[in-house]
Image (tube, grey):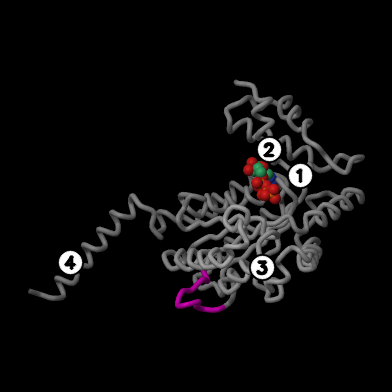
């Protein structure tokens, strides 16, 4: 018996088995992780409203990161803005374009303090579990995505668990984290962003003229100094572990109408101007006098669509 031939045949059989397995079950392969940057761009252009800074920064950062075969560290975003402005929505758009199964992929993990780490008495257990999830996921697939919502409510000890994975360390316990992505979401800085935008409006400038650089320092200073945000205690910022602080701007009446139309369309209702205006009129805007920004962004649009939507 030719040992080389046996070896090759065994190898081929294993490869065929792997191929068959991965046709039906999610694997860490191109089929399941298409990393569709073009699709991401299209979705950001067509589905995300009023967030020109977030769209541009996130697209460019992800494109560059995925092009680099040997990134120096994982890609880490911190998304900031008031409620309903699209932070979770953009995370979903990213997951859907990079992974075939989107948020349901085994390589994508979402964490919410009140859901995943609700009871302080169990913090040690949560810490161990979180560490194991991150390690096992990246071990099975380096292109893993971790999304942490309500980061300002995350316990500092939990943040400290995440910290080593974000660093330039080549290996943490023999696994390299450099191809993973981390997204942190929080409302911290939302008020400052809104205040900035209000001044932009008062000075007669266009919202679209505001650039990342105009808001970045305001944002880091606010997040850094906010005593309860959990961030400062954890040194995430001190150590420059976050690559991009991304501001989400408060949404205006015209954006609420776009959200209304998109939701009406998705539900199969008529998408006429009148219905979209009716929905946008129902939302609450601030400041009281100017009625410029929607208090809840597009968050409650969905419920209003159920109420106002008319069959085609
Ligand atoms: N900028 C936007 N463009 C299009 N749709 C949006 C936008 N912002 C919010 N939406 C819609 O509103 C819903 C709620 O928004 P989302 O959950 O992303 O808000 P959020 O910023 O994460 O809020 P929170 O801080 O309260 O978690 C989304 O699922 C989406 O349908």
Residue at figure coordinates x 74%, y 43% from the top left = 297
CA neighbours of label 4 inside 10 A, class few (<14), some (14 to 19), many (20+) = few
Residue 214 in picture, x, y percent from top left: 81, 61
**Front residue of this view, candidates 108 and 252:** 108
Q: Secondary structure at mark 2?
A: helix
In contact (CB < 8 Å): disc 3 and disc 4: no
In contact (CB < 8 Å): disc 2 and disc 1: yes
Location of the N terminus by quadrant is bottom left
Overall secondary structure of the magenta section: loop
Residue wearing tag 3: 156
Q: State whether label 1 is within 8 Å of ligand 1.
A: yes
Residue at figure coordinates x 71%, y 51% from the top left = 52
Q: State whether label 2 is within 8 Å of ligand 1.
A: yes
Residue at figure coordinates x 75%, y 42% from the top left = 296
Toward the front, the furthest residue is 121
CA neighbours of label 3 inside 10 A, class few (<14), some (14 to 19), many (20+) = some
Cα gap from disc 3 to disc 1, whole angstroms: 31 Å
Residue wearing tag 4: 9
Residue 192 in picture, x, y percent from top left: 82, 57
Between circles 1 and 4, the one closer to the viewer is: 1
Residue 251 is tagged as 1
Let me know if residue 175 is in the magenta part: yes
Q: Is residue 74 left or right of residue 3?
A: right
Between circles 2 and 3, the one closer to the viewer is: 3
Q: Is residue 86 visible?
A: no
């Amino acid at each position: 018996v030719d040992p080389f031939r046996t070896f090759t045949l065994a190898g081929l059989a294993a490869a065929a088995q792997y191929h068959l397995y991965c046709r039906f079950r999610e694997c860490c392969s191109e089929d399941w992780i298409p990393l569709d940057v073009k699709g991401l761009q299209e979705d950001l252009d067509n589905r995300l409203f009023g967030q020109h800074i977030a769209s541009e920064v996130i697209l460019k950062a992800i494109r560059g990161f995925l092009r680099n075969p040997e990134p120096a560290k994982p890609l880490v975003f911190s998304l900031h803005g008031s409620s309903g402005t699209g932070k979770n929505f953009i995370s979903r758009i990213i997951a859907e374009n990079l992974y075939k199964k989107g948020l349901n992929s085994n390589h994508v993990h979402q964490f919410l303090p009140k859901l995943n780490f609700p009871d302080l008495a169990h913090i040690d257990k949560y810490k161990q579990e979180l560490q194991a999830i991150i390690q096992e996921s990246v071990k099975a697939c380096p292109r893993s995505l971790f999304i942490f919502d309500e980061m300002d409510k995350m316990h500092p000890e939990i943040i400290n668990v995440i910290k080593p994975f974000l660093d330039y360390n080549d290996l943490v316990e023999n696994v390299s984290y450099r191809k993973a992505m981390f997204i942190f979401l929080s409302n911290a800085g939302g008020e400052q962003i809104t205040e900035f935008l209000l001044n932009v409006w008062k000075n007669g400038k266009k919202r679209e003229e505001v650039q990342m650089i105009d808001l970045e320092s305001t944002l880091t200073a606010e997040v850094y100094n906010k005593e309860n945000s959990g961030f400062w205690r954890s040194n995430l910022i001190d150590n420059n572990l976050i690559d991009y602080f991304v501001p989400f701007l408060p949404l205006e009446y015209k954006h609420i109408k776009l959200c209304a139309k998109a939701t009406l369309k998705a539900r199969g209702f008529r998408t006429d101007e009148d219905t979209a205006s009716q929905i946008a009129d129902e939302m609450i805007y601030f400041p009281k006098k100017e009625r410029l920004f929607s208090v809840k962004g597009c968050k409650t649009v969905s419920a209003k669509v159920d109420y106002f939507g008319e069959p085609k």
